Amino acid sequence: MSRAARADCHSELFDILERTELTAHSDEQVQRLALLIRKFLIDKVGAAGGHLGSNLGMVEVTLALHRVFRSPHDTLLFDTGHQTYVHKILTGRARSFDQLRKAGGLAGYPQQKESEHDVIENSHASTALAYADGLAKARQLTGETERAVVTVVGDGALTGGMAFEALNNIAAAPQRPVIIVLNDNSRSYAPTVGGLAAHLSRLRLGPPSQPREPAQAAGSLFEHLGLAYLGPVDGHDTSAVEEALRAARTLRRPVIVHVTTVKGRGYEPAERDQDEHMHAIGARPTPGSPPAPAARPSWTALFSETLCTLGARHDNLVAVTAAMPGPTGLSRFQARYPDRFFDVGIAEQHAVASAAGLAMAGLHPVVALYATFLTRALDQVLMDVALHQLPVTFVLDRAGITGPDGPSHHGMWDLSILGAVPGLRIAAPRDAKQLPLLLEEAVSNRSGPTVLRFPKGTTSPDLPRQDSYRTVDVLHTTPNSDVLIVATGILAHSALRAAETLLARGIGTTVVDPRWLLPISPDLLDLVGRHRRVVTVEDNTRSGGFGSALAHLAAVEHPDTSVRSLALPSRFIPHGERHTLLAEAGLDADGIARCVLNSLTPPRYDTAQNS
C-alpha cells in the first residue's frame, strides 16, 4: 500500500472513531472498522516495533467488548497487556501511535496515567484473573453490582499457576459475576503446551454451545470447576462475540466465553512466519536510510550456540523454559536435543521447582528466563533449589534496562533479590568471549545454584584483561592509582571510557571486572582495601544490589575506604531507548567519570544516589 493510501485509511479511521459512537455502527460498518484498524496496526507497529501478532488477533474481540460494555464504568482487564493496542485505539489514543514505545510517548502496555480505561499496568501473565476476583469481591461489598468485571485471558496465560488459583476462587462464588473471555489462539510466545492445550483443542472441535449451567452439563474443565461455559465462538465474527458477551452478562455468575482467534490475523507474514512476525516485530527501517552494518550476534544467540556446544560435552545437561524457547535462545538446543528440553508453559514457579527435581536426579538443568520473570519464582529459587544446594543454572536474558517495553520488563532487581539467596553465585559477562567461559564454569559447578545474567541487544567487543588480581580481571590501571572502579558485566566498556576521561584530567584509576559478582569474593574485597575510593557500577537497582553488598563488607573490613554505588534508581523506570535510560541514571562514561570526580571532591549532594 502506498503512503498516500495508508494516510487515507488512517484519516478514515480517525473520522469514524471521533465522529460516531461505536455502538451505532451496523455489522458492515464494524467489519470496515476492523479492516481499517488492522491496516493501521500493520503500518504503525511496523514502524515503531512492538507486539503485532497478538493485537491483530484481538481486533474483533476488542470491538465486541467495547460495543457490549461501557469502559471504564465496566472494568476491562487484559492478560497480558501486550494485546491492548486495539483497546488503546478505541479509547482515544489512535493519533498517539506515531510515538508508540518511544520515550514520553504511548506505552506498549496499559498505563494508568495514559487513560482511565487502563487498569492493570503489570504485563506479567496469569495475573488478571486474580485482579478480577478482587474487583468482584469489592463490587459485591460496595453494592456496585451493575459494574461488570470482564477479563481477557489467553490460553497461554492459563498455563500459569496463578490463573488456576484465581479460577478456583472465582468458581467458588457463583453470586459474584466475573466474565472471562478466553482468547484461544493456541499460542503464547510459542505454541501452548500441556494437558490444558489438549483440552482446549478438543473443545474447539466441538459444536458451539448455548449457555450452560454447571449442573446441566459438564463437558469442559471449566464447568467441572463450577463456571458457566459459552463457546467455542469465532473470535473474528464480531456479531457472534457480541451475542456471547451479552448472554454471559445476563447469566450474572462467573462464566467463560471461549473465543477462538488467529494470532497475526490479516497480516500474511505473521500468519506464515510463526516466530519472526507472530508475536512481536522490530521497527521498520526508515525509507532512504543507509543499510545497517553487519551486526554482532546477540547475547541470546551466543548463549544458544554455547549451550548446544556444552550439551555435546555434558550428557547430563538439560534445558527448561517457561513458554519462551525462541526468545530465550533454547530453540536450537530443543532441535538438537529434544529429549533434554522441557517447555512448561507460562509457569516460572513450576519451571524452577521442576528443575530442582531434575537436579535431584543427577542432571544439571539450565533454566532460561527473562530477568524480570525470575522474580515470580523467588520462593522456588530459595527453598526448592538453594536450600537443597542443587546444581541448577539460571540464565537471565534482558537483565538491566530493556528499553521500549517499560517498567514491568526492565530486569533491574535480580541482583538485589538473588543476593539474599545463600549459596547462590551470580556472574555477568562483559563481552562475547566471557559468556562461554562463565557458562561453562556454571554448568560444571556441582556445589549449588548459579546465575548468568546478560542484557538485551548485541554482544560487546572483547575487552582483554591487562592483568589479574587473583580471581579479579584488571582491565585498566595506572601507576599509583587511588581510585578503583568495579564494573559489572557490559558496563565495563563505559567504565573504561570513563577512565580515559579521568586520565586526561590527571586522575589515575584502576578498572576491574570481578566476573562473578555475588557473593563478594575475598579477592575483590582485599583489592578494595588497597584503594581509598571505590565506585561500583551496575545495571541493577541501587537498593540491595552488588554495590550495596560490597559497601557493607568494606565498611567492616576496610573502614578507611569510601565506597560509592552507581546503579539504577530505586523506582520504576519508564520505557525509552536503552542507552538514553542508562545515561539518565549516570551509567554511561560521562556519568561514571562524574561520579568518580564527586567522590574526590564531595559536592553538596551525592549524584551516585540516583534518586
Image (cartoon, rainbow, N blue to C red):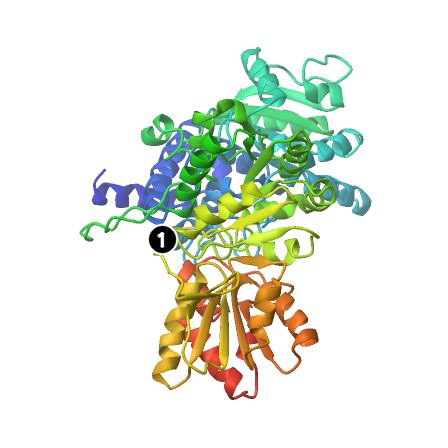
Quarter of the image holding residue 522? bottom right
Going by the image, does 120 lie left or right of 143? left
User: Against 576, is 217 above or below?
Assistant: above
Residue 461: x and y in percent read 34, 56
- Mark 1 Cα-neighbour bin, 10 Å: few <14, some 14–19, many ≥20: some
Q: Is residue 324 visible in this depiction of the protein? A: yes
Going by the image, does 42 lie left or right of 407? left
Q: Quadrant of the N terminus?
A: top left
Residue 210: x and y in percent read 64, 15
Q: What residue is shown with label 1? A: 98
State the residue in front, 417 or 466.
466
| Amino acid type shown at disc 1 | Asp
Secondary structure beneath dot 1 equals: helix
State the residue in front, 121 or 488.
488
Q: Residue at x 68, y 74 (%)?
A: 557
State the residue in front, 267 or 439.
439
Q: Residue at x 57, y 28 (%)?
A: 155
Q: Quadrant of the C terminus?
A: bottom right
Residue 146: x and y in percent read 71, 39
Residue 496: x and y in percent read 39, 69
Q: Residue at x 51, y 53 (%)?
A: 399
